[in-house]
Image (cartoon, rainbow, N blue to C red):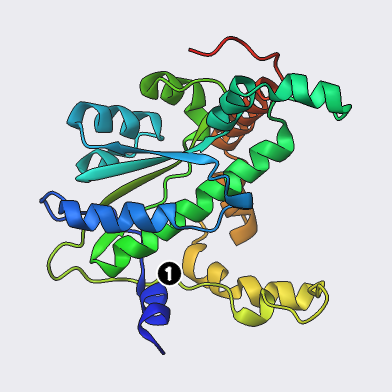
């Protein structure tokens, strides 16, 4: 196994950080890795906020589902899905008028543009994560930004067509930190050849058997009879997911609103 493969295999989500600032040369490596990421048509539909202010980190932690450890990270990178800059540039350079003259029509950023921005942003974030890992700097993906999109947008003074998609607290691994790997599903249940393999009931039982054994502990006062029921109540069916869906629907609706004058 080469060094990169081993690094990917060994990475864990880090929620406890060495109490020291990240060296500027290390931050440059991390940010340059993000900026070198694959991107749709070289458009780079993202922006990155580098947050080091203690009070702002606390506010982010509060708005990201009260995850207090975020505020303890030396640096928090916020990855923004950003269609604002390209849309401004199009208006600046007369693209709406040009498109009308060409008979091809002009539209504000729509759902396809939002998807491209989300993809670009996540790819860049992961490049930053892996570059950081190579330097002994751990991180943890925080995906609960969408549930408080409006509050975070105000905190960061975000214009139209910019969405705070991913928060990445980062810091050096503590000395003598013991990495504990979380088991994944077996490859045979995830990687298929040529066409999709629809798992049988027996295969599904096998796929989730380790999760059942590891995470499901029946409690007399609970109605859950298996891991699926327990996990659904804890995560998939939790009100937090409903609030996230509602927030995302607002983002999608805003993506269709009439363009307003930029700040």
Tell me, yes or no, if residue 139 can be seen here: no
Drawn side of residue 183 relative to residue 70, left or right: right
Kindly identify which residue carries mark 1: 182
Rendered-image quadrant of the N terminus:
bottom left
Percent x, y for residue 246?
Answer: 63, 27
| Residue depicted at 26% across the width and 28% down the height | 56
Seen as rendered, the residue at the extreme bottom is 1
At 73% across and 21% down in the image, what residue appears? 96
In front here: 77 or 199?
Answer: 77
- Observer-nearest residue: 236 or 116? 116
- Going by the picture, which residue comes out furthest to the top? 261
Residue 94 screen position, x and y as percent = 67, 21
Question: Which of 209 and 186 lies nearest the eye of the viewer?
Answer: 186
Q: Quadrant of residue 156?
A: top left
Tell me if residue 236 can be seen: yes
Above or below: residue 225 compared with residue 79: below
Q: Nearer the viewer, residue 74 or 17?
A: 74
From the top left corner, tell me how far across and down residue 199 is, in percent. 78, 74
Specify few, some or many for label 1: CA neighbours under 10 Å numbering under 14, 14-19, or 20 or more: few
The part of the image, by quadrant, that contains residue 18 is bottom left
Residue furthest right in the image? 103
**Which residue sits at x=40%, y=35%?**
64
Q: Position of residue 188 (x, y in %)?
A: 67, 82
Residue 66 against residue 33 in the figure, above or below: above
- Looking at the rendered structure, the number of numbered marks drawn on it comes to 1
Query: Which residue is at a point 85% across and 28% down the rendered structure image?
Result: 102
Instruction: Assign a secondary structure to mark 1.
Output: loop
Q: Is residue 220 left or right of residue 209?
A: left
């Amino acid at each position: 196994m080469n060094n990169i493969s081993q690094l990917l295999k060994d990475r864990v989500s880090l929620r406890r950080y060495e109490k020291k600032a990240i060296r500027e040369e290390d931050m440059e490596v991390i940010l340059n890795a993000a900026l070198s990421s694959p991107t749709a048509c070289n458009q780079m539909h993202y922006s990155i906020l580098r947050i080091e202010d203690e009070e702002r980190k606390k506010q982010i932690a509060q708005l990201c589902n009260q995850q207090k450890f975020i505020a303890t990270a030396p640096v928090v990178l916020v990855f923004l899905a950003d269609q604002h800059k390209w849309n401004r540039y199009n208006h600046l350079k007369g693209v709406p008028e040009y498109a009308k003259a060409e008979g091809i029509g002009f539209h504000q950023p729509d759902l396809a543009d939002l998807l491209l921005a989300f993809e670009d942003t996540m790819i860049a974030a992961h490049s930053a994560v892996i570059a950081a890992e190579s330097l002994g700097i751990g991180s943890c993906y925080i995906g609960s930004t969408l549930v408080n999109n409006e509050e975070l947008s105000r905190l960061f003074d975000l214009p139209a067509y910019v969405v705070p998609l991913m928060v990445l607290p980062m810091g050096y691994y503590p000395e003598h930190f013991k990495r504990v790997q979380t088991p994944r599903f077996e490859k045979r249940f995830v990687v298929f050849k040529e066409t999709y393999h629809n798992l049988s009931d027996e295969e599904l039982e096998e796929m989730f058997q380790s999760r059942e054994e590891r995470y499901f502990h029946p409690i007399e006062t609970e109605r859950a009879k298996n891991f699926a029921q327990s996990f659904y109540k804890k995560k998939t069916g939790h009100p937090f997911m409903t609030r996230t869906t509602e927030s995302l629907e607002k983002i999608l609706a805003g993506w269709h609103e009439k363009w307003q004058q930029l700040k």
